[in-house]
Amino acid sequence: HLELLWKGMGRMGARRMKAALPEWLPFYEDCSDEVKREILKMSESTIERILQGPKAQFRRQMNCGTRKPAKPMTEIPIRNKEIQIDSVGHIEADCVAHCGGSLSGQFSWTLNTTDIKSGWTENEAMWGKNGTVVKKAMKEIEQRFPFTVEVFYSDCGNEFLNKYFIEGYIKAPYRIEPLEYYRGRAYHKNDQCYIEQKNNTHIRELMGYARVEWQQIVNKMNNVYRKEWRLLQNFFYPQQRLLEKNRIGSKVKRKMSRAVTPYQRILEDHNVAENIKERLRKEKESLNPFELQQKLKKKLQYINQLIRTTGEEPTKGKYAT
């Protein structure tokens, strides 16, 4: 009965619940008056002890894939949202979990990155999520961007704010100068609005919400991310950008830009070098979007078949590595 009351009372803490019980119990009709008197006699510590199990189960259900970093967040400056981005190379990054609703155990993640000015997006699947894995994935992604990465933005997750990622990627020895690195504020997803919206359009709509717990599938996912998916999204799928937003009474009126592909935005950017534009033109001339769609469809069917397959990890047959 105490657990049912706790859920019905909005899952408040033991101290607040103890104070609120006299007001709530008269309206609780699922137990006798004797049980109600016993509940009223309970101390705060007794209520807390009895609710330990239900609270732990609720925390598991509400788990989030972002963990606070061991490295002090104050060492990484908070980004200034008032600065207008007028050049390519400003990259936002985020990690998307393929956990199937449970963050327990080992499973696949996707590192999602996008350029703020052009909308050019690159993805990389990873097995697990730690500083070393994210560093390796980000190096792979950086090679696929048609321009140089100048500034890096992330949330406050421990996969980014750790010494392995900062020293191995942001301050990598091969760089003449470290990348500029800024973080968003904790619990302010809108600080990472450009990448948050692409978590749905570029990851969830493609891979869904299923749990990916076979390490072999990561290679299949990367085969899609590095070939058909990046080419379709960056060369053939137009994107709109929010130009302005005004509140009129109870309604919000948004003014959007014309739909333009990231490729076209780069061609129209006067700050991008001409050799980069020429290289992208030649790459696009060799592409057929319908052929890319057919190849993508076949690969996704195979990946979904692997995900649906249950039982022991195969060592023989078509599902083996």
Image (cartoon, grey):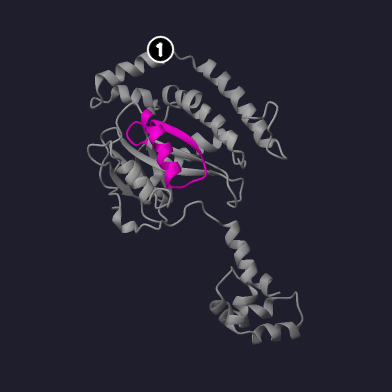
Whether 25 is drawn above or below 288: the answer is below
Whether 246 is drawn above or below 144: the answer is below
Q: From the top left corner, tell me how far across and down residue 53 is, in percent.
A: 64, 68
* Quarter of the image that includes the C terminus: top right
Camera-side residue: 89 or 197?
A: 89
**Residue 285, quarter of the rendered image:** top left
Instruction: Judge left or right: residue 295 versus residue 266.
Output: right
Q: Residue at x 52, y 45 (%)?
A: 128
Q: From the top left corner, tell me how far across and down residue 306 is, in percent.
A: 66, 33
**Residue 194, quarter of the rendered image:** top left
Crowding at mark 1 (Cα within 10 Å: few <14, some 14-19, many 20+): few
Camera-side residue: 243 or 106?
A: 106
* Residue 240 visible at all: no
Tell me which amino acid carries mark 1: Glu
Chain part drawn in magenta: 115-143
Please tell me how many numbered marks the rendered image carries. 1
Q: Residue at x 43, y 32 (%)?
A: 122
Q: From the top left corner, tell me how far across and down residue 309 is, in percent.
A: 70, 35
Camera-side residue: 201 or 77?
A: 77
Residue 139 included in the magenta stretch of the image: yes
Q: Residue at x 30, y 40 (%)?
A: 172
Instruction: Judge left or right: residue 100 versus residue 147.
Output: right
Q: Residue at x 33, y 17 (%)?
A: 279
Q: Which residue is mark 1?
A: 285
Residue 6 included in the magenta stretch of the image: no
Tag 1 secondary structure:
helix
Camera-side residue: 266 or 308?
A: 308
